[in-house]
Amino acid sequence: MTTPTPLKNPAHAPCAAALVMIDFISEWRVADRAALLRQVERAVPHAVRLLLGARRAGVPVIYANDNFGQWRSDFSAVWSAAVAAGEAPARIAAAVAPEESDYRVLKPKHSAFFGTPLDLLLEHLGASTLVLCGVAGNQCVTATAIDAHMRDYTAVVVHDASASRTASLHRHAMEQLKDLGLGVVAAGSVRWTTLLKT
Amino acid sequence: MTTPTPLKNPAHAPCAAALVMIDFISEWRVADRAALLRQVERAVPHAVRLLLGARRAGVPVIYANDNFGQWRSDFSAVWSAAVAAGEAPARIAAAVAPEESDYRVLKPKHSAFFGTPLDLLLEHLGASTLVLCGVAGNQCVTATAIDAHMRDYTAVVVHDASASRTASLHRHAMEQLKDLGLGVVAAGSVRWTTLLKT
Amino acid sequence: MTTPTPLKNPAHAPCAAALVMIDFISEWRVADRAALLRQVERAVPHAVRLLLGARRAGVPVIYANDNFGQWRSDFSAVWSAAVAAGEAPARIAAAVAPEESDYRVLKPKHSAFFGTPLDLLLEHLGASTLVLCGVAGNQCVTATAIDAHMRDYTAVVVHDASASRTASLHRHAMEQLKDLGLGVVAAGSVRWTTLLKT
Amino acid sequence: MTTPTPLKNPAHAPCAAALVMIDFISEWRVADRAALLRQVERAVPHAVRLLLGARRAGVPVIYANDNFGQWRSDFSAVWSAAVAAGEAPARIAAAVAPEESDYRVLKPKHSAFFGTPLDLLLEHLGASTLVLCGVAGNQCVTATAIDAHMRDYTAVVVHDASASRTASLHRHAMEQLKDLGLGVVAAGSVRWTTLLKT
């Protein structure tokens, strides 16, 4: 192209915080599927609470989701596959469904920063605080949280809106993030209006 | 997610080369629109020749295209906008239209490597030689070609399948790439079978 | 410069593996200094064993070390400060001292891949397997190991040649890496000649 | 390490601009050495003028320099080799010599952003405007300037403090950067106090 891309998206005024929803949209073709889905379904109501709070406060919501080995830049295909899978995958997808104005980032690997425009999107949104939740807490959420921390974002991981394969893997992952200096909180204690003032 | 993503896409066997089509899909809302579109329409038949040759030889084709300030991971919206614009934008899009099995990478800025999974996709395809064409030759094609060269890909830019706002800006950009050590060739001299042997 | 940099370093023939020593060279101005140093001094003999084995097998050794907020590209200043600190810092540095032909990478943050040429150096060495050890196991070693895994390296973390502030943080970090699909082994079970055949 | 690195360097208060000196320190073992050195020696007085102005205004100076295929994080070795080469290399190095408080970034490839901590260093300095000069104008300076532009820095290239192998390659490179939307100015027209107000 011959002119600079208009990078600021008009859907949002600059906002000091953003909510990042990691890998909720999936057919869940994974090892230990039943165990993981049980944990995820427990986390979903807390994730929904975060979503509602963020939308009410005008905080941008970003869905960072696996591209599942496809390289077609087609988020809606990922969405349709989850819905078509029915049962738990469809229930989870429906509960945390993106709205038209939400942002979508397809990621090829664990961290939502790796091989994606997430860092640039956050810069354009003006977001310096990231509230993160998703699956798996000890894998993609951890990898994304560490990457956010290294890039000098204030990263807050919401433990009860995230899920890992076992409760103990999840708890140890949250302890590790705390030891690294990140915030680890419950969904009920996220105060969006306070975050927006920082 | 809890299992490593299956990153190799089964659509292609490993292939030593890939064709990258840069920013052909557009409404062309740019400065000097008429002048640029005249140059682009001259380049399109050469780009089509490359496309046909790559497909015949089984070389993967990657469409790297501006996301136009949207962050929705939705290549088909970009495609639809170009088609809906009619006339030159629709003609160009139709001529170089992606097939189902082609790869798509939405890029937020000039280089197709910046804020995208292109590097990882190429690694998974096994491609070490990149044949590049597109618009603008002195901007996004140049930025992508320099990035490919820095990452140790063998980068070949096809000058007559690319276009810049003026013929002289285009010629100078191609000279600069040659001076940097990249290949600059005409579409008619790309020998896919030879590239695949390197 | 006007010619491509000669990037392959002649000090090593291509080698399928590399040993990465993370943050051993330090004045250890950290919280819980005494507790951490106790763990580090326990790990050092295992790290030395790795070093000797790697050198005997002709495997390149890379020292990835914090730049401690300085941006002077001066590894020897970091080294001198550790030695000048005396006692444990000097003992540790001396035990794992780099040789002239070893590689050095100063890192500004936790992961040795972030803001450094490590990925490019490994590509030039031809290394696809990384053996990692260092401090802290639950922080910089974990961040580096996850980054290596995302970049499709085969990453093996040597648990007894690494140290974290507490034994339990260390154990949980190792479990997390295993759950992610990485190798976690003892120094005594690293078989360099086998790694070089893969 | 177990505590976050203290990343802000106390040598500078936050500053809206930075001067980046690209590849002046070299033995100049390049093709067309004599032709290039003639152009470089013409550029040096303008680079010195920039250096003096930046230092007077309290603007941080960053030396971004090729690592020449060595991976030892040792800027002083690069410096010593240039001085030891005598004649033009030593004259050039002496004229633009770094001071103790200047920053140094060793780069493995053309762009000073690729495989280096430059982006992070600039963030920590608070710099949003980059004034760039160096060698070769149509190669490393161009690659660095495009990368700065893609990362939303205001990038200003100083044409007479930069040099390429031929005057025409240099002029075309500067035209290309202008066409991309970057500033291209003479050393005499850089107003540091104005830059610091933006």
Image (cartoon, coloured by chain):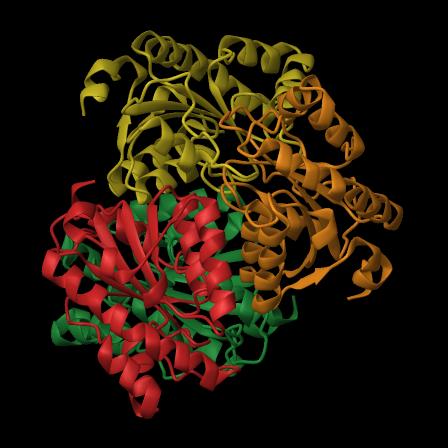
Chain colours: A yellow, B orange, C green, D red
Vertically, is D42 above or below B96? below
Relative to the observer, which residue lies in front, B193 or D45? D45
Q: Residue at x 59, y 61 (%)?
A: B177
Q: Is residue C186 visible?
A: no
Vertically, is D1 above or below B63? below
Q: Is residue A50 visible?
A: yes
Q: Residue at x 63, y 23 (%)?
A: A78
| In-image side of B126 versus C123 (left or right) | right
Which of the 4 image quadrants contains residue A137?
A: top left
Task: Residue A164: give x, y in percent of width and height.
Answer: 46, 28
Vertically, is A8 above or below C112? above
Which of the 4 image quadrants contains residue A177?
A: top left
Task: Residue D42: give x, y in percent of width and height.
Answer: 34, 76
Quarter holding the C terminus of chain C? bottom right
Relative to the observer, which residue lies in front, A171 or B104? B104
Q: Residue at x 56, y 21 (%)?
A: A25
Quarter holding the N terminus of chain C? bottom left
Relative to the observer, which residue lies in front, A136 or A168? A136
